[in-house]
Image: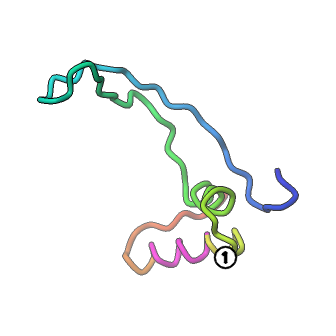
Amino acid sequence: MSSIYEAKEEMHQIEAQLYPNHLAGGENTSLAKNLKEKTINVDAICAAMRNRGGYDGSHDEAVKTVNHFFAEGNEKPYIPH
């Protein structure tokens, strides 16, 4: 964890399969299909926002604000364990 940012990001890998592009004008190019990718939660998204997205506020405040937004929209908020 960085001494500058209080949010720890979890890095992950994705797997993709390349297919030939048969669309008009797409000669000699490929299309990528995502095979599997790990899902991330609000905490991880806010960590990325803090570390890479230029957000300069508190990580905890960002998580609280996003969860409040979900609660207003009748979505199930993320509750850390």
Q: Residue 10 in magenta?
A: no
Residue 53 left/right relative to 36: right
In this picture, is 1 found above or below 49?
Answer: above
Measured from the top left, where is residue 78 in percent x and y?
Answer: 54, 63
User: Going by the image, does 55 lie left or right of 2?
Assistant: left
Query: Which contiguous range is marked in magenta?
Result: 63-70
Q: Is residue 59 above or below residue 39?
A: below
Rendered image quadrant of residue 76: bottom left
Snapshot quadrant of residue 58: bottom right
Q: Which residue is mark 1?
A: 61
Which residue lies at the image location 79% right of the left edge and 62% below the top edge?
A: 6
Residue at 56% x, 60% y is 42
Question: Relative to 70, is 72 above or below?
Answer: below
Q: Residue at x 64, y 69 (%)?
A: 55
Tell me: residue 19, above or below residue 45: above
Q: Secondary structure under badge 1?
A: helix
Residue most extreme to the right: 3
**Image quarter (top left, top right, bottom left or bottom right) of the C terminus:** bottom right
Secondary structure predominantly adopted by residues drawn in magenta: helix
- How many residues crowd around disc 1 within 10 Å: few (fewer than 14), some, or many (20 or more)? few
Q: Quadrant of residue 62?
A: bottom right
Between 28 and 75, the one lying in front of the other is 28
